Image: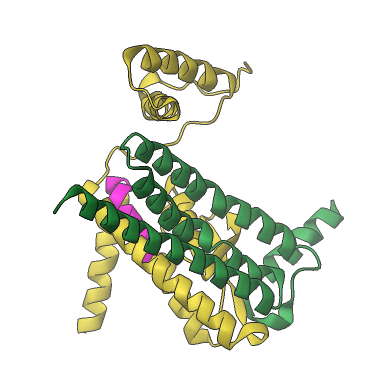
Amino acid sequence: MTAENWDSVVDVASGILLAAGALLSLGAAIGMVRFPDLMSRMHAASKPQVLGMFLVLVALGLQLRTWVVWPVLLLAWLFQLLTVPISAHMISRAGYRTKHRHPELLSEDELAAVVAKAGEKKTAE
Amino acid sequence: MSPHRRKIRLLQEIPLLIWLVLVWAVLWQDFSPGTLLFGALLALAVTRVFYLPPVQLSGRFNVPRAALFTLEVLSRTAWASLQVTWVALVQGPKVRNAVLRVPLRSHSDLILTAVGHVSSWIPGSMVVDVDRSTSTLYLHALNVHTPQDAAKVRADVRRIEAKLILIMGSKAEVLRLKAEKAEQAGKVQA
């Protein structure tokens, strides 16, 4: 294969990856509109941040065409991987204890009793 | 420094120091000795000023298993992303969820954190609360209508934990896991 051929192969591949990453964001947006409460929306919202980010970063790496950027892109993804679950956890933890808990949307809730008990202990003190 | 702080041995800190030096070099996109040396100095300074309790590593890490697990997590994330989109389209406001209690086998902070992270990466489950003293995760799971769905989510998280123990758990944990598996196999046969 000639260099030009390779160039277009890389272009097409990164195009597909970018489109796939964007589609994940679309899926997340649909989830944000359709889901009824904070917690289920969080599932949709944290979705493109793992796989979508991965696809877009790989596309970027292919397009930039130098090997030096790959470690930087990997680092960007790793930090995203480390921080996304924590922010999702903090938001849902806070949401669960405030008006964002909707028991009618839960088929099962094994945390409610634990939180209630902890609350009782606090007021007793 | 307060007298209550446990002293960390340099050996325990080395993985963290190497990681910090690597981050520094990657950010500068330069791996020359000068950058690495300055990075090492900075890493030492950072770990002295921003003190954190040491991460207790088990001393074993299975690279082939870790590589397989990474591929599995990526493919499951892709599949679960499609499922969440499908649930959003089909069920939307009628979706039912559950907050489930999943007790883990391991009491290692590292495994607990890793299981929490992996189950959060895979769309459809999210950590709402953690009880560190009993090593229990409380997960919010999307699209759980029946107790069978709930049991599936719990078993899934326990399976992720088993895989992580096989990758980087301590020897004692691996032995306990093997004993548990043997017991289950015995029950199935009997």
Q: Position of residue A97 (x, y in %)?
A: 76, 62
Residue B159 showing in the rendered view: yes
Q: Position of residue B44 (x, y in %)?
A: 47, 17
Look at 33% across and 53% down and name the residue there: B165
Q: Which chain is yellow?
A: B
Looking at the picture, does residue B116 appear above or below residue A76?
below
Q: Which chain is green?
A: A
The secondary structure making up most of the magenta span is helix
**Is B173 left, or right, of A95 in this rendering?**
left
Placement of the C terminus of chain B among the 4 image quadrants: bottom left
Look at 53% across and 64% down and name the residue there: A47
Look at 32% across and 17% down and name the residue there: B32
Identify which residue, B118 or B2, lies in the foreground: B118
Place residue B139 in its image quadrant. Answer: bottom right
Q: Position of residue A74 (x, y in %)?
A: 40, 43
Q: Position of residue B180 (x, y in %)?
A: 29, 65
Looking at the picture, does residue A62 appear above or below residue A47?
above
Q: Is B160 a magenta residue?
A: yes
Residue B175 showing in the rendered view: no
**Is A67 left, or right, of A54 in this rendering?**
left
- Per the rendered image, the range of residues in magenta is B159-172
